[in-house]
Amino acid sequence: MTTLKATFEALGYSESTAGYYAGTADPHVALVRGAFLHMLWSLVIDEDHHVDREPAWIESWMRSARKRGEVPTGLAATLQRVLDKGVDPEDLTDIVRAQQWEIIYNVCQLLDGEWLDDLRNKLPDLPGFSWRLYEVAVGDDYVASPVRALEDLHAELGDLDPTGRGGDARAR
């Protein structure tokens, strides 16, 4: 049986943070928030995953055209042009990963209700509302009922970067 602390660590929390959350009166909130953030990070390319000595994300875009012996089209064609110019695939990986990090960070800020004042200033007739990500309980009848809002997503996202760099690019 896995301990609660080990579960937090598996989600990417440091040993000390995992111990802190596991010892709180209600670790469930942090566990659900951590699971969501962990899944967001799983959508970001893995800079260390390579196929045939090429970053796996580039290889996956190029694979189908290469198998058929065709000229790449769409994004694969764009990638091929960039690579043909001599751009290091690892530099492309760092750029794409940084952009992915920025997007998920900004989505977390939106879900945390950030920037709504700016939007209301631009659109004063906008009705009052906010965005939040909610944990829901699913009953036996598969009806989902909101349990609680998951807050401060953006503040914790960097802590769960699988590389331990908080979203920063590699130092090479």
Image: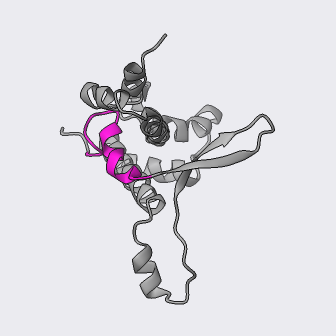
Please state which of residues 153 and 88 is positioned toward the viewer in this rendering: 153
Q: How is the image coloured?
A: one colour
Does residue 164 show up magenta in the picture? yes
Please state which of residues 123 and 91 is positioned toward the viewer in this rendering: 123
Query: Dividing the picture into quarters, in which one does residue 135 lie?
Result: top right
Please state which of residues 5 and 102 is positioned toward the viewer in this rendering: 5
Residue at image location 35% in from the left, 37% down from the top: 160
Residue at image location 53% in from the left, 36% down from the top: 60
Does any portion of residue 92 appear in the rendered image? Answer: no
Horizontal side, residue 61 vs residue 30: left or right: right
> Range of the magenta residues?
151-168
Does any portion of residue 54 appear in the rendered image? Answer: yes
Please state which of residues 168 and 171 is positioned toward the viewer in this rendering: 168
Indicate whether 46 appears above or below 121: above
Question: What residue occupies the far bottom of the structure in this picture?
Answer: 125
Does residue 68 show up magenta in the picture? no
Indicate whether 128 appears above or below 48: below
Residue at image location 44% in from the left, 42% down from the top: 37
Q: Percent from the top left, x then y, of residue 149?
A: 51, 52
Q: How many marks?
A: 0
Question: What residue occupies the far top of the structure in this picture?
Answer: 1
Q: Percent from the top left, x then y, of residue 53?
A: 38, 26
Query: Dividing the picture into quarters, in which one does residue 48 lie?
Result: top left
Horizontal side, residue 64 vs residue 80: left or right: right
Residue at image location 40% in from the left, 66% down from the top: 114
Task: Report the quarter where the C terminus lies.
Answer: top left
Question: What residue occupies the far right of the structure in this picture?
Answer: 141
Q: Percent from the top left, x then y, of residue 1?
A: 49, 10
Question: What residue occupies the far left of the structure in this picture?
Answer: 172
